[in-house]
Image (cartoon, rainbow, N blue to C red):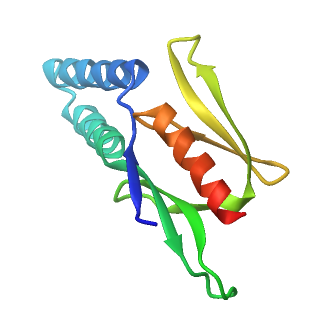
Amino acid sequence: MTDRTFHKRFSVPAKCGVAVFALLTGYFFWVKVAIIGILLAIVIVGMIERILNTTYTFRRVQPIDRDEEMDFIVINEGRFSRNQTIPVCDIVSVEPMKMCWGLDHALVIQVGANKLVSLQPDNEESFIREIEKRIKNEK
């Protein structure tokens, strides 16, 4: 099976967060408090980099400790963070959940008995179908 990549959805709360920090940055430069303005500009660059470069990739690899290949979801949240890997065979459930007072929604994936991972893929239906397809191929 080939690799399949999904990008993160640029949601309304993320857009509002970037806009608020941009307005704060402009305000602090306006009142000539440049150090705080520069720090907030760095925060904005980090936020935008994380939003634009987050990907969820389905990848089939052979782990070191096993003889057969397995499917994994590799979560890459940009250049400044470490990749997170989730084995598809360990996924118990995938459920949509509302966040941020109902303004946004995400997929909550239960991995194993007590680990939850929240993802915001751009095309949720296709993402769920890909998980189901990969789970069927594992069995």
Find residue 25 and report its image quarter. top left
Q: Residue at x 42, y 33 (%)?
A: 123
State which quarter of the image contains the C terminus. Answer: bottom right
Q: With respect to residue 101, does 32 lie above or below?
A: below
Q: Nearer the viewer, residue 11 or 18?
A: 11
Depth order, front residue of 128/96: 128
Picture coordinates of residue 68 (x, y %)?
64, 82
Horizontal side of 107 relative to 25 (left or right) equals right
> Where's residue 50, x and y in %?
36, 45
Q: Is residue 54 left or right of residue 94?
A: left
| Residue at the (14%, 18%) spot, across then down | 30
What x and y, as percent, mark residue 88? 64, 58
Quarter of the image for residue 72 reads bottom right
Q: Is residue 64 above or below residue 60?
A: below
Vertical side of 44 occupied by 6: above or below:
below
Q: Answer left or right for 41 relative to 129.
A: left
* Residue 22 image offset from top left, x and y in percent: 24, 24
For this view, does 81 lie left or right of residue 36?
A: right
